[in-house]
Amino acid sequence: MVAGVTMFLNSDLVLKIFFLLNPLSSVPLLFLAYKRKMDVRKVAVYSVGLALLVAFGFVLLGPLLFQVYGIGLDSFRVAGGVLVFLLGLSMARDKDGDYDKAKPDDLINIIATPLLTGPATLSFLIITTAEVGAASVIANLVGAFALVAFLFLLITYFIRKVNLSYIMFISRLFGLFLVALGIEMMVAGLKVLMFS
């Protein structure tokens, strides 16, 4: 079984999904949970689990949207590229949400979606599933979420010592990567739409 999973693993795709998930943008909410004396590890684990379920759902059901709405893959690629570009731009510009007033019960949901699995991530997963198949995307999704879970657990272990400003600086660098990925997706879709 392990050999079957590793056959589908692609380090480039795992990293793309990991950058799209941008777990560092969720770290301020883990700090908020810590300040509120919540079980931060529980918040982290439940958030990752819920986000993974949402992602699985879109990988399995997302391609049906093409058939139901009659949308072409390249049109969706351009739309998804716009979303990824805007997500990257907002991350690079350090536009953080105001979550201080969020109820304790809502923290897990907010981290799971929209922070980990927002529209940009989900559109990328749908497009990639249409291109390479659900089995490959699921294997790489599990790899990316394993990295997110490891990072979250590491942060919760050292939460008293972590400098939030450094974390958010690295998150902004992730945003630059996403801007480039969004442009790449838009160009790939537009080439086909304009020259076919």
Image (tube, grey):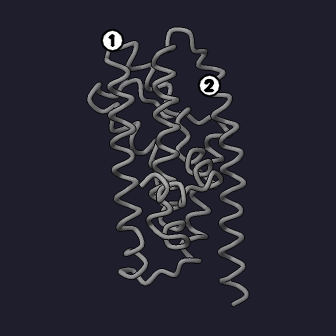
| Type of amino acid under label 2 | Ile
The residue at which mark 1 appears reads as 37
- Of labels 2 and 1, earlier in sequence is 1
* Residue name at image x 51 percent, y 22 percent: 154
* Residue name at image x 49 percent, y 67 percent: 129
Query: From the viewer's perspective, is 139 left or right of 94?
Result: left
Residue 45, how many percent across, how many down? 36, 31
The mark total stands at 2
Q: Quadrant of the C terminus?
A: bottom right
Residue 168 figure quarter: top right
Query: From the viewer's perspective, is 172 left or right of 14?
Result: right
Query: From the viewer's perspective, is 130 left or right of 193?
Result: left
75 w.r.t. 31: above or below: below
* Residue name at image x 73 percent, y 87 percent: 195
The residue at which mark 2 appears reads as 167
Is label 1 in a helix, a strand or a loop?
Answer: loop
Pointer 2: residues within 10 angstroms few (<14), some, or many (20+)? some
Q: Nearer the viewer, residue 147 or 3?
A: 3
Is label 2 in a helix, a strand or a loop?
Answer: helix
Residue 126, how many percent across, how many down? 47, 65
